[in-house]
Image (spheres, rainbow, N blue to C red):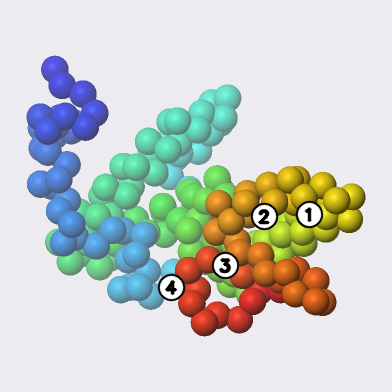
Amino acid sequence: MTRGGDAQHRDERGEEPERRHGTEDPPLLLGHEQVGEQQLSPDLPADFVAALDDDLGVPGALAVVHNAVRDGNTALSAGDKDTVIDRLVAVRSMLAVLGLDPVDEMWAGGAAGRGSDTHLRKVVDALVAVTLEQRQAARARKDYAAADAIRDQLAALGILIEDTPTGPRWSLAGRAGAEPDR
């Protein structure tokens, strides 16, 4: 018997996963682009609910999600729009219970979502500002080795520091011609 990434690995149907769902098949969670936005359902699959009711059996619940995704991908490949919608709603509803719905605004990068670019920019700016304050304090103490180490650590993370008469400014490396971020 073979395992994991071995080319001879077969699923419970005896098929190689790559052959059953090739790269030409669109994944179910992108199905909302083809069938339109669907409302989540409060009616969750019974086996999903049973798994979570059994001492919060997340592995069992994820197995139900996996099976629904597989069924949805099969329907998507076959062009069965009704089954795609049914499986898409079921998968998204189950993932929403787990806080993992990929279409949720939190993950989609919407302006109000915690996964948004605006939120991320604010967090990164605050973290870099704290680090630059530490660097400025080291320079004020004439601890140039510590100041240089902070600058080098930021550079290793892709954050370039430019010392100006008005204070340090930072930008992301690899953004030629970009305005400094701060």
Count neighbours of disc 3 (C-alpha within 10 A) and say few if under 14, some if 14 to 19, many if 20 or more: some
SS for dot 2? helix
- How far apart marks 1 and 3 lie (CA) works out to 18 Å
Q: In this view, does 139 lie to the left or right of 17?
A: right
User: Which residue type does callout 2 highlight?
Assistant: Arg
> Looking at this view, is 166 or 28 the one in front?
166
Q: Mark 1 points at which residue?
A: 135
Q: Which of marks 4 and 3 is in front?
A: 3
User: Which residue type does callout 1 highlight?
Assistant: Arg
Q: Which of marks 4 and 1 is in front?
A: 1
Q: In this view, does 78 lie to the left or right of 31?
A: left
Q: Name the residue under label 4.
A: 37
SS for dot 3? strand
Q: Position of residue 175 (x, y in %)?
A: 50, 73
Q: Residue 172 carries which label?
A: 3
Q: Nearer the viewer, mark 3 or mark 2?
A: 2
Q: Nearer the viewer, mark 2 or mark 4?
A: 2
Q: Mark 2 points at which residue?
A: 151
Q: Position of residue 39 (x, y in %)?
A: 49, 67
